[in-house]
Image: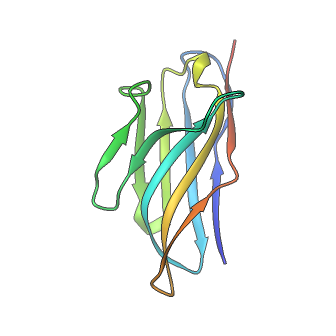
Amino acid sequence: QVQLVESGGGLVQPGGSLRLSCSASGSILSLNAVGWYRQAPGKQRELVAATASGGILNYADSVKGRFTISRDNAKNTVYLQMNSLKPEDTAVYYCNADILRLTYRVQNYWGQGTQVTVSS
């Protein structure tokens, strides 16, 4: 069994900050590539930031300079630090990860999502 759980969402005023966490647990060896996605009402899910196990980082243009993705491999956790938040950042944020299982197979998982609301 594998669980991928996001946390850290909430309500924040414009200009504020939040840090999201994505933690994997269960019969796993490691996280490989991990991406943070978001989906606003009436819009398609979009990639916000991604990190590969080799350290390569990728960001959507809309969040460059404001969001930072990082990982703690010992904790099988990936973070998304979000600064200078704007109302248009409001969405459900999802974590997606390629996970190396104890069976040495890599499988892809989605978390359940965490709501981020930026409003005054």
Residue 53, relative to residue 50: is it above or below? below
Q: In the image shown, does 56 or 68 lie closer to the viewer?
A: 56
Residue 44, relative to residue 24: is it above or below? above
Q: How many marks?
A: 0
Give x and y (percent) for residue 66: 42, 26
Give x and y (percent) for residue 54: 28, 60
Give x and y (percent) for residue 111: 64, 55
Q: Residue at x 67, y 78 (%)?
A: 1
Q: Residue at x 61, y 34 (%)?
A: 44
Q: Residue at x 64, y 29 (%)?
A: 43
Residue with the most extreme top position: 120
Identify the image's colour scheme: rainbow, by chain, secondary structure or one colour. rainbow
Residue 25 figure quarter: bottom right
Q: In the image shown, does 82 or 37 lie closer to the viewer?
A: 37
Residue 16 figure quarter: top right
Give x and y (percent) for residue 110: 61, 57
Residue 3, relative to residue 7: is it above or below? below
Q: Residue at x 66, y 38 (%)?
A: 9
Quadrant into which the C terminus falls: top right
- Left or right of 90, for residue 83: left
- Left or right of 69, for residue 27: right
Residue 55 figure quarter: bottom left
